[in-house]
């Protein structure tokens, strides 16, 4: 009797749980926070789409979490490329491209999501990823499974130094943005009336995969150029306070500050620099959190004058070939239509890299065959100005220490002017002149 | 000397922020024996509320808190009735899962509603810097310090002299005896939970002039809050206040004199030392750290 009374509620609960599990397994094949765009959901990954058929390509970006601002911007650039290609009639005889989206806010999620994309969704090509940390982890999973990983963003040097066969990185390395910052600091010396050898340079970087690589490259290049580096400090991007770092830098009296921040830490850094009166003559940031719209939105006019050794954005169209120049304005229009503002560095990278894949690599490969796609990518030899952001294409072949890296990528120097970013260096790509050299002190600025 | 004063000022101001965030957490632990893993997310909600109030009405943080506090109090009431109440008698593991689940839901709802972009209030008040001799401090942090002190005194007065405050203290001391004395425990839990949430909401409002708000911002602060609560003694409000100041000072000093890269390591080292030498924290009761496991 008693056994029955206790047994029934337990049985019901067990059945209820089982039913819930079955329901969720059928209804939601991914972990929370992911979705599939346009592709069939459920256990069977076979596409059964419209008449022309579908091409299923995976995407992995941090769409949630600390890096969501960058992940979403990057995904948008990727998606606009897909939109344009599909409108032109798709690829491989009219097949429409559909994205199988994955959200990876951190490295653990990246591993899980890549496994899901590869084993459950059966994709053979994944585009990513905005974050160096995610690129590093996700591409390793792809390599193990012989799936192509098309990385348009991650700058950490180590990403393309592992001898991977299936990784293609269209973007420049940390050596480019980090080293570029040191090069530009050197360029600024005469403009600031300082001797490059005695000019005091401070380098600060966030201690994640991204910042460490960029900071190291900046320090190495600075040493190579014979610059006087007075500080080389790291900090945690998630720190709730940077005042001890700012005070430490302040005590060393730097002339130029080179800084690698990844997200909202850039905003916190600059605000606390103002609060604690850290005055430098120039700030050369290295993209990341210093080069996104959120930065200027959140620090206001204090952003103006800051340089960023960054990825090329809307470069001077004269530096592009005709097709790329037309694509440049098309991208700006579509991006503006979707968001009401102009695209930033990562959106450009995403768009340029994905268009390259969709226009030049996949058609040449002819089918979703990993080896054919690899061959098509390695065979590319396009001069500078071919991609919509000014890049050319020539991937390092397998066997090269940086296999898979696009050697015809480069960094430029942007500068915040009037709340927007302009290209100021090098001359042939510039669409504006540098301003506010040297930076006014906080007292001189309107607070 | 100037540097030393500056470090002390910065450390104390930072510490007072930590204190205010932690007071709510320690209250929840002391009375409800609840480890609120969603604490950072409520902080984030308070920050967003203050941000939107500023965007819509131009309210500065020190005024917005009068709206954010009651708003989050009401929200806390709702969350208690819907979620926490049902876990009050459950094993600790279930309660932890409930608050973790709540954290995930809140964070992702914020992301869905407001996107991942980080937002910062810009106003003369948020940018104002106070200079006292060689020391520079952000005015909004000084105001936050003053408000934290006022709120703590108000909380102390509330707990000491009002009926419900005494009921709360009684429940914290001995739940069973409080029941026997005719105290409505459920009401005590309800009010305490809502108060704890209101407190962290006010802390969030005070953070907005300095920190950008985005859905995941709470996680960064809740970790520090846990350190402060354990350091000060779980359930002890003076402990949370003092603990916060200590952590702020340790962080700032170690960051300057040793290395900015290691400053968090230092307050965690302090945390480990406290746990090893005096596990109940500075002001906690011996055995408090094991509540929920017995």
Image: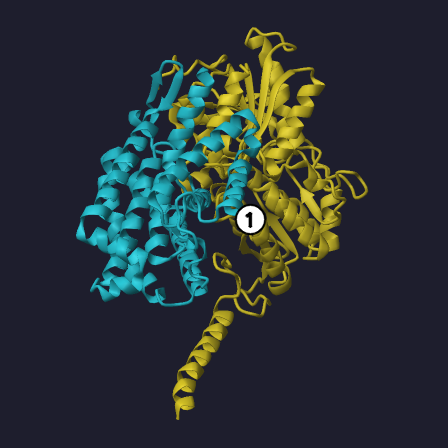
Residue shown at 39% from the left, 30% from the top: B12
* Residue named by callout 1: A106
**Chain containing mark 1:** A
Left or right of A434? Residue A443 is: left
Residue shown at 81% from the left, 42% from the top: A399
Task: Supply the letter of whichever chain is cyan.
Answer: B
Q: Colour of chain A?
A: yellow
Q: How many marks?
A: 1
**Looking at the picture, how far across and down is residue B276, in whole percent?**
53, 46
**Looking at the picture, how far across and down is residue A350, in whole percent?**
56, 41
Indicate the secondary structure of the residue bearing disc 1: loop
Q: Quadrant of the N terminus of chain A?
A: bottom left
Q: As rendered, which of A126 and B10 lies closer to the eye?
A: B10
Q: As rendered, which of B72 and A98 lies closer to the eye?
A: B72
**Looking at the picture, how far across and down is residue A7, in whole percent?**
43, 86
Is residue B213 visible in this depiction of the protein? Answer: yes
Residue shown at 54% from the left, 30% from the top: B260
Residue lying at the far right of the rendered structure: A399
Residue shown at 71% from the left, 34% from the top: A407
Q: Is residue B131 above or below residue A137?
A: above
Is residue A57 visible in this depiction of the protein? Answer: no
* Crowd around label 1: few <14 · some 14–19 · many ≥20 (10 Å): some
Q: Is residue A342 above or below residue B218?
A: above
**Looking at the picture, how far across and down is residue B27, in whole percent?**
33, 50
Q: As rendered, which of A346 and B193 lies closer to the eye?
A: B193
């Amino acid at each position: 009797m008693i056994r029955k009374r206790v047994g029934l509620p337990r049985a019901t609960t067990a059945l209820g749980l089982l039913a819930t599990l079955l329901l969720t397994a059928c209804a939601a094949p991914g972990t929370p926070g992911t979705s599939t765009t346009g592709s069939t959901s459920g256990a069977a990954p076979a596409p059964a789409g419209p008449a022309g058929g579908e091409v299923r390509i995976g995407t992995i970006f941090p769409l949630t979490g600390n890096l969501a601002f960058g992940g979403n911007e990057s995904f948008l650039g990727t998606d606009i490329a897909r939109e344009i290609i599909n409108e032109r009639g798709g690829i491989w005889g009219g097949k429409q491209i559909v994205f199988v989206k994955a959200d990876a806010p951190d490295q653990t999620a990246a591993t899980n999501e890549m496994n899901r994309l590869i084993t459950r969704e059966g994709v053979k090509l994944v585009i990513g990823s905005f974050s160096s940390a995610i690129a590093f982890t996700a591409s390793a999973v792809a390599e193990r499974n012989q799936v192509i990983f098309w990385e348009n963003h991650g700058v950490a040097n180590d990403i393309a130094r592992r001898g991977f066969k299936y990784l293609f990185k269209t973007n420049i390395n940390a050596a480019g943005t980090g080293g570029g910052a040191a090069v530009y600091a050197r360029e600024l010396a005469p403009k600031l009336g300082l001797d490059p050898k005695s000019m005091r340079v401070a380098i600060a970087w966030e201690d994640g995969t991204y910042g460490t690589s960029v900071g190291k490259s900046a320090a190495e290049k600075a040493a190579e150029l014979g610059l006087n580096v007075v500080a080389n400090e790291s900090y945690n991007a998630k720190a709730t306070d940077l005042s001890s770092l700012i005070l430490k830098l302040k005590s060393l009296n730097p002339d130029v500050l080179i800084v690698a921040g990844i997200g909202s830490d850039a905003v916190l850094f600059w605000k606390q620099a103002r609060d604690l009166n850290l005055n430098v003559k120039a700030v050369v940031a290295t993209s990341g959190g210093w080069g996104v719209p959120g930065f200027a939105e959140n620090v206001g006019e204090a952003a103006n004058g800051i340089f960023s050794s960054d990825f090329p954005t809307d470069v001077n169209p004269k530096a592009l070939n005709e097709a790329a120049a037309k694509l440049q304005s098309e991208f700006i229009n579509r991006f503006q239509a979707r968001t009401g503002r102009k695209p930033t560095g990562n959106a450009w990278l995403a768009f340029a890299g994905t268009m390259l894949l969709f226009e030049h690599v996949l058609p040449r490969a002819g089918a979703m065959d990993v080896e054919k796609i690899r061959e098509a990518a390695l065979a590319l030899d396009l001069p500078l100005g071919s991609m919509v952001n000014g890049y050319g294409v020539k991937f390092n072949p397998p066997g090269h220490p940086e296999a898979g890296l696009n050697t015809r990528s480069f960094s430029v120097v942007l500068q915040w002017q009037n709340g927007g970013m302009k290209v100021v260096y090098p001359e042939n790509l510039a669409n504006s002149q540098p301003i506010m050299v040297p930076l006014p002190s906080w007292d001189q600025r309107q607070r | 000397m100037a540097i030393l004063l500056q470090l002390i000022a910065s450390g104390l101001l930072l510490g007072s922020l930590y204190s205010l965030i932690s007071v709510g957490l320690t209250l929840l632990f002391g009375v409800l024996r609840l480890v609120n893993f969603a604490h950072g997310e409520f902080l984030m909600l308070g920050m967003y509320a203050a941000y939107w109030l500023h965007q819509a009405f131009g309210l500065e943080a020190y005024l917005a808190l009068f709206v954010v506090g009651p708003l989050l109090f009401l929200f806390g009431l709702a969350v208690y009735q819907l979620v926490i109440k049902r876990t009050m008698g459950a094993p600790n593991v279930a309660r932890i899962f409930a608050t973790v689940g709540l954290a995930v839901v809140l964070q992702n709802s914020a992301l869905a509603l407001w996107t991942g972009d980080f937002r910062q209030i810009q106003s003369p008040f948020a940018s104002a810097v106070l200079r006292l001799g060689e020391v520079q401090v952000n005015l909004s942090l000084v105001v936050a310090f003053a408000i934290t002190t006022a709120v703590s005194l108000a909380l102390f007065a509330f707990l000491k002299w009002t009926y419900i405050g005494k009921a709360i203290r009684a429940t914290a001391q001995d739940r069973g005896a409080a029941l026997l004395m005719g105290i409505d425990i459920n009401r005590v839990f309800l009010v305490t939970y809502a108060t704890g949430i209101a407190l962290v909401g006010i802390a969030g409002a005070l953070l907005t002039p300095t920190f950008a708000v985005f859905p995941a911002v709470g996680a960064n602060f809740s970790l520090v809050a846990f350190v402060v609560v354990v350091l000060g003694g779980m359930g002890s409000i003076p402990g949370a206040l003092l603990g916060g100041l200590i952590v702020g000072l340790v962080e700032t000093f170690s960051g300057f004199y040793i290395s900015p890269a290691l400053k968090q390591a230092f307050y965690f080292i302090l945390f480990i030392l406290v746990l090893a030498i005096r596990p109940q924290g500075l002001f906690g009761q011996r055995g408090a750290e094991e509540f929920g496991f017995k």
